[in-house]
Image: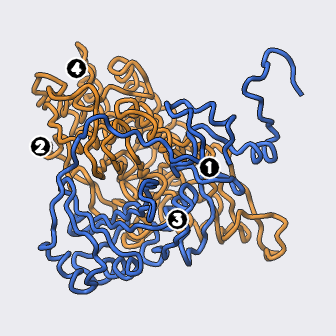
Amino acid sequence: MSETIDITRPEIDANEMILNMGPQHPATHGVLRVVLKLDGEIVTDLDCDIGYLHRGVEKICEHRTYPMIAPYFDRTDYIAAASNGLCYVETIEKALGLEIPLQAQYLRVILVELTRLSSHLLWLATHALDIGAVTVFLWAFKEREEILKIFENFFGARLTCHAFRIGGMSYDAYDGFEAEVKTFAKRFPSSLAEYETMLNSNRIWLSRTVGVGIISGEAAIDIGLTGPALRASGIEWDIRKAHPYECYSELDFDIPVGENGDTYDRYLVRMEEMRQALRIIVQALDKLPGGPVMAAKVSKVIKVPVGEYYHSVEAPKGELGVYLASDGGTQPARLRIRPPSLLNLQALRQMSIGHLYADVVAIIGSLDIVLGEIDR
Amino acid sequence: MPTEDNKAEDLTTNTSKSPSETPAKKLPRRPVGSMSIVEITSEPLVKSLQEKFGTAILEANEINSQKVLTVEKNKLYEILSYLRNEANPNFNMLTDLTAVHWPERTDKPFEIVYQIYALNEKYRLRIKVNLAEEETVKTVTGLWGAANWLEREVYDLFGVRFDEHPDLRRILLPNGWSGHPLRKEYPLVYKDNEWVEQNLQIRQLPLDGDFTGKFE
């Protein structure tokens, strides 16, 4: 569709109907506007209207010093703040050539994987709610609350978690952190099993998700899908394994892969990913080496050498990348954020055409998008 | 376009500059050096590209151990098409497509950056092309579907046009907005007052206005 759809446009077929969904629609997970072209209840075309949350983060970054930029990243994907913070500080560290103490690396991994759990739980809750499973919504929020309590103790915030600094962490774990995470890790698998008994063999759930929004592996790569959405199409690719960062190469975990690339497989992949994240957390807790959390040689005024650097991490939603172009000053010449949700949302059109209108809601849910990150 | 009034809100140190002036690119007080740059002409992929496209490969470097090629604009599409379809490794993924504005490079201020990736070989490559003001470049939507929105974003935020793009319109900013925010001459705090007034019926308040009482 080449224009924002105008309802009065004469060329629309008499059998077709234009339906506006959003921007204030609970199933769009934010302020996303989708304009659908319908033939009866079948979607024949759709157009996404994004940008409602655009606040020019990349422009602001060009006018802030490197340490000042970090908090802006917590507010891009606001339900996985720690992952974003990690991506930014790692980019600067690698551009500077800084070595990070092991204790900081392990702590970062624990926190980032906890973030993955909380992000996936929020996804599960809202995705299930969209399809009508209210119980799962309440149960998932209960577990997510436990993670947020740990975050509140660690970061002092529930959503805008921010403790990663260029060169390490701003402080070490508080007393009792390990015990709290271990208690959570012990109980969580049984909760996960409960969600699965609610959904895996639920007839309504299966009829709403199996075979809906299929995308082949090749098409997924072409459209730039990353993260669980790509793996559900059978492509075994995870940045934590392909280009290990922090201490991931020392930890043992598997990459769950789907087969059909439909909404149900994306659900299964994320559920399994939560188990793997938990495995990582337990291992990292046992391996916590102690020692300093901040690299010794971090200058007070951070100036990145002239040049450019691209770095990406496996955020809960997919490949989150930062491209930094530096002119040698205290502020970046250009800081580009590559949001996974933007490229994942682009696949919505391809996935939805030919499906029922109600399935669009399921497909948006299965893509796990965050508009704060898409619009930046 | 920006007026003096808008500039007065600018929170950075360069408030005194007028919008038309070259924007503040704060030069470092003491030189900080540059990242390590190593030529990689012996790399098999670069060799095959140089054999095929000759001088169109302007630079082939490893910057901070990341492979970067700068290519000529005329051959860009052919090179990308070769990398997508024929080259070994096969670059089947377009990770990112963005631009950088360097106003101090007066002849070719825009740099379009393609981050491409060979998923099977786990091989990252960055292709860069320099463009003059108003110069356009051919779209790569035919090579990678992912390019569609990424090119729209570059057009929206930098004003760089992509020839033959199927759907080139603004993506983040609303239709009819004036200016392209990620250009360096675009001030940090600025909004298109005319657009806001027409579309949102919000009238701009005078900056030195009296906000205590009522206004029209």
Q: Chain of mark 1?
A: A
Q: Which mark is residue A250?
A: 2
What residue does disc 1 label? A32
Task: Give yes or no for contact between labels 2 and 1 (Cβ–Cβ under 8 Å).
Answer: no
> On the same chain: label 3 and label 4?
no
Q: Position of residue A169 (x, y in %)?
A: 25, 26
Q: Nearer the viewer, residue A357 or A218?
A: A218
The amino acid marked with disc number 4 is: Asp
- For the image shown, how many numbered marks are present on the structure? 4
A133 relative position to A26: left or right: left
Q: Nearer the viewer, residue B19 or A325?
A: B19
Task: Give yes or no for contact between labels 4 and 2 (Cβ–Cβ under 8 Å).
Answer: no
The amino acid marked with disc number 2 is: Glu
Q: State the hue of chain B.
A: blue
**Rounded to the nearest whole Å, what is the CA distance between mark 3 and mark 1?**
33 Å
Above or below B108: residue A122:
above
Q: Position of residue B73 (x, y in %)?
A: 41, 75
